[in-house]
Image (tube, helix red, strand yellow):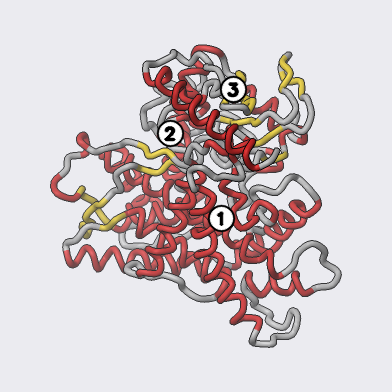
């Protein structure tokens, strides 16, 4: 197609979109429109709109989002059929246009297809980052970072000022990851750098989560009409530049291969990249891997901790019950350690209930099928995009009693877990594309949450009553709290 034809097609498409949008604004009850299909039926909260569609049309349905066939999975049974029994057929990613910035999709453990290169990255993560042996050996490091968090909260307590829970959790997670990866702290609770990095990561998540015409109309990809990929070039560049500086500093030490007994993750990654026996892992790929791990690790952990604190502040009787368990198991004035967590059944139930109600990624990263796939008597057409609405599954009234209520008690005595085997609760996904950071998240979240509620009483800023809290969500790639929690710690 020559340039003039391209421009004419583009103009015709935009005029048609504007014309059809006028109909969509009047409401079409989910019925597909010409050209745009069901695109304008999703609204600003697609996870909720898709839930309403599922209630009407069933847990397995296909929508036309622009020119892209999109299959929506909205029940535990269908998710299990797809992600367990047909895992290989659903293992390829549908790459959204924003992720193509700086060719990140060609280097990303999250977005690469299930290829030998992806399997190599996954093996590296499993052996060098999230292995049981490395996590066990770094328990003291995580405890130290949580101690830093508690010290900061104590200072706020002395000064009588509020803690922004999400920012404090982000700084703690950032320092944990940076200490594990680089043996340095990249942020303190008041660090401008930490705040800037958080803003870049949050901006990345929001940009990726925005409706993008280029994802729904392939003809628009080159034009990037909303400028999303151009903004992602800048955001990715900001984060990757930092990692490149740290990598270059390490390389300039001229350290021999495998020379440090207690090496950090960056040393291990550099050793692998310089090992001639290892394939498909060049030093240039390290910043992209770090971008994935830091982006997903800091944002999802922060969101989960903030939602957990919000729900506990919103339900004082649940907070009281959690504090009583900690006091009984840990003892007043004692420090919570990771080895205590298996004994803290109610604390674990709180984390599970938070992930059920507020999965960090409400629509699992999109997948696609490379050939026709038969699923429960239906045919999913080749190249269709597949979305799993874990937000809907977590609130399915056929599975959960009082599904919209925060009731950690539902998990007491239950074997349901978040590790991808119980499809009624899959906030981290399932199958071969399950989140590689799950082992660290399941250690870090209860440790931070338990430490915050064991060490202090909390009251909302400006005298806000628990029943008057704003519990609205803000949809993006991740589902953060619309109004961030600010609470004043009170010494027990």
How busy is the neighbourhood of tag 1: few (under 14 within 10 Å), some, or many (20 plus)? some
Residue shown at 43% from the left, 23% from the top = 21
How busy is the neighbourhood of tag 3: few (under 14 within 10 Å), some, or many (20 plus)? some
Determine the secondary structure under disc 2: helix
Mark 3 against mark 1, which lies toward the viewer?
3
Q: Which mark is residue 357?
A: 2
Determine the secondary structure under disc 1: helix
Seen as rendered, the residue at the extreme right is 277
Q: Which mark is residue 440?
A: 1
* Quarter assignment of residue 65: top right
Tell me residue 102's x, y (percent): 61, 58
- Foreground: 259 or 225? 225
Work out whether mark 2 precedes mark 1 in sequence or the reverse, and give the earlier one.
Answer: 2
Q: Is the C-beta separation of discs 2 and 3 under 8 Å?
A: no
Tell me residue 422's x, y (percent): 61, 32
Work out whether mark 3 precedes mark 1 in sequence or the reverse, and give the earlier one.
Answer: 3
Give left or right: position of 51 versus 376.
left
Work out whether mark 2 precedes mark 3 in sequence or the reverse, and give the earlier one.
Answer: 3
Q: CA distance from mark 2 to mark 3?
A: 28 Å
How busy is the neighbourhood of tag 2: few (under 14 within 10 Å), some, or many (20 plus)? many
Does residue 182 appear anywhere in the picture? yes
Q: Which residue is mark 3?
A: 64
* Quarter assignment of residue 147: bottom left
Give left or right: position of 155 versus 57.
left
């Amino acid at each position: 197609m020559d340039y003039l034809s391209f421009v004419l097609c583009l103009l015709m498409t935009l005029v048609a979109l504007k014309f059809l949008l006028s109909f969509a604004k009047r409401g079409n009850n989910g019925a597909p429109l010409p050209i745009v299909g069901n695109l304008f039926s999703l609204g600003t909260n697609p996870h909720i709109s898709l839930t309403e569609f599922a209630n009407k049309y069933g847990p397995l349905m296909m929508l036309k989002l622009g020119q892209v066939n999109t299959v929506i999975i909205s029940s535990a049974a269908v998710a299990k059929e797809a992600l367990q029994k047909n895992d290989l057929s659903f293992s390829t990613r549908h790459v959204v246009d924003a992720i193509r910035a700086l060719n990140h999709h060609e280097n990303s453990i999250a977005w690469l297809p299930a290829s030998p290169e992806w399997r190599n990255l996954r093996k590296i993560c499993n052996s060098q980052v999230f292995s049981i042996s490395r996590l066990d050996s770094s328990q003291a490091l995580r405890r130290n970072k949580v101690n830093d968090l508690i010290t900061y909260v104590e200072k706020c307590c002395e000064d009588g000022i509020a803690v922004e829970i999400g920012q404090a959790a982000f700084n703690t997670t950032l320092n944990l990851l940076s200490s594990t990866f680089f043996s340095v702290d990249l942020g303190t609770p008041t660090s401008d750098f930490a705040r800037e990095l958080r803003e870049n990561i949050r901006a990345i998540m929001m940009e990726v989560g925005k409706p993008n015409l280029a994802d729904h109309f392939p003809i628009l990809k080159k034009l990037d009409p909303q400028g999303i990929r151009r903004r992602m070039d800048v955001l990715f560049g900001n984060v990757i530049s930092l990692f490149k500086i740290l990598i270059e500093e390490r390389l300039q030490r001229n350290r021999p291969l495998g020379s440090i007994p207690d090496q950090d993750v960056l040393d291990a990654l550099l050793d692998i990249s310089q090992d001639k026996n290892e394939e498909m892992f060049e030093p240039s790929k390290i910043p992209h891997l770090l971008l994935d791990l830091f982006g997903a690790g800091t944002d999802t952990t922060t969101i989960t901790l903030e939602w957990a604190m919000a729900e506990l502040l919103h339900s004082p009787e649940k907070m009281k019950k959690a504090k009583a368990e900690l006091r009984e198991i840990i003892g007043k004035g004692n420090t919570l350690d990771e080895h205590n967590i298996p004994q803290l059944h109610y604390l674990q139930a709180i984390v599970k209930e938070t992930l059920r109600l507020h999965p960090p990624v409400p629509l699992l990263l999109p997948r696609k099928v490379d050939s026709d796939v038969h699923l429960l008597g239906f045919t999913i057409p080749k190249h269709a995009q597949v979305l799993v609405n874990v937000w809907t599954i977590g609130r399915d009234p056929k599975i959960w009693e009082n599904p919209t209520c925060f009731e950690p008690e539902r998990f007491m005595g239950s074997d349901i877990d978040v590790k991808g085997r119980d499809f009624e609760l899959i906030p981290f996904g399932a199958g071969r594309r399950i989140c590689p950071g799950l082992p660290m998240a399941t250690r870090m979240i209860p440790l931070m949450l338990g430490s915050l509620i064991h060490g202090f009483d909390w009251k909302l800023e400006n005298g806000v009553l628990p029943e008057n809290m704003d519990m609205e969500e803000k949809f993006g790639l991740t589902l953060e709290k619309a109004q961030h929690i600010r609470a004043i710690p009170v010494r027990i």
